[in-house]
């Protein structure tokens, strides 16, 4: 389901699209029919309750931005998938740095892109290739945990799956982790350190 923040973003943009597309005297029923039609054409849904918060929402927002004549919003939503993948790449690089004990940020990601024969900027890489780069980095992260620290997976209390929020902590020759508690609405996330909820040594 969409977060409250996503719903607010949709309704604000839809209000502007309505002003562009519908006559001033349009009835509530006509407005509702128009909105459901736009939603169906954009992502095959007629209710916001059924819109998934990633690909569906991206397509819906891009379509509504185009109806509103908002080219800046169109440019933002047209590459939303790539931005999400780039975020995952950045978080994976951070985690690799935590595991090996040296900070790894976007310079490391750019080196990986160049080594793979790709442009240094994620914005110049098609989403499919960008996701392949994420998979390559995630494979490296898993390999480090299994090869260097003997991690055996979820059943052993040593999860190998990717969680972008996970934080790894080196303790001598061992690596532990903690997963911050999920927050229903990211905008409501409290400041400060997340509580320790998981640890593998």
Image (tube, grey):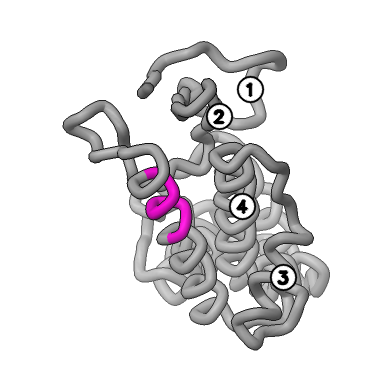
Q: Nearer the viewer, residue 189 or 24?
A: 189
Magenta span: chief secondary structure: helix
Q: Give neighbour class at mark 2: few <14, some 14-19, many 20+ (Cα, 10 Å).
A: few
* Residue on which the image places disc 4: 93
Mark 4 or mark 2, whichever is nearer to me: 4
* Residue on which the image places disc 3: 111
Image quadrant of residue 102?
Answer: top right
Q: Earlier in the sequence, mark 4 or mark 1?
A: 4
In the image, what residue occupies the spot 64% across and 71% down? 112
Q: Secondary structure at mark 3?
A: helix
Q: Secondary structure at mark 4?
A: helix
Q: Give neighbour class at mark 1: few <14, some 14-19, many 20+ (Cα, 10 Å).
A: few
CA distance for labels 3 and 2: 34 Å
Q: Nearer the viewer, residue 110 or 73?
A: 110
Q: Secondary structure at mark 2?
A: loop
59 versus 196 height, above or below: below
Residue 125 placement (x, y as % from top left):
65, 81
CA distance for labels 1 and 3: 35 Å
In the image, what residue occupies the spot 54% across and 39% down? 99
CA distance for labels 4 and 2: 25 Å
Residue 33 placement (x, y as % from top left):
45, 63
- Assess whether residue 144 is covered by the magenta stretch: yes
């Amino acid at each position: 389901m969409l977060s409250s923040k996503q719903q607010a973003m949709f309704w604000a943009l839809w209000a502007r699209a309505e002003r562009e597309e519908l006559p001033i005297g349009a009835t509530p029923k006509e407005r509702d029919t128009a909105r459901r039609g736009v939603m169906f054409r954009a992502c095959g849904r007629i209710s916001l309750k059924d819109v998934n918060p990633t690909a569906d929402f991206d397509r819906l927002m891009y379509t509504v931005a185009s109806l509103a004549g908002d080219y800046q919003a169109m440019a933002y939503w047209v590459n939303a998938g790539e931005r999400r993948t780039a975020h995952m790449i950045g978080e994976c690089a951070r985690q690799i740095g935590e595991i090996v004990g040296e900070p790894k940020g976007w310079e490391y990601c750019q080196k990986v892109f160049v080594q793979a024969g790709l442009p240094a900027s994620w914005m110049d890489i098609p989403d499919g290739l960008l996701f392949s780069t994420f998979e390559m980095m995630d494979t490296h992260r898993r390999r480090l945990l299994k090869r260097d620290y003997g991690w055996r997976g979820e059943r052993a209390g040593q999860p190998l799956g990717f969680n972008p929020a996970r934080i790894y902590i080196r303790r001598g020759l061992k690596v532990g982790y903690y997963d911050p508690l999920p927050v229903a609405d990211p905008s409501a996330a409290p400041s400060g350190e997340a509580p320790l909820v998981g640890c593998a040594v």
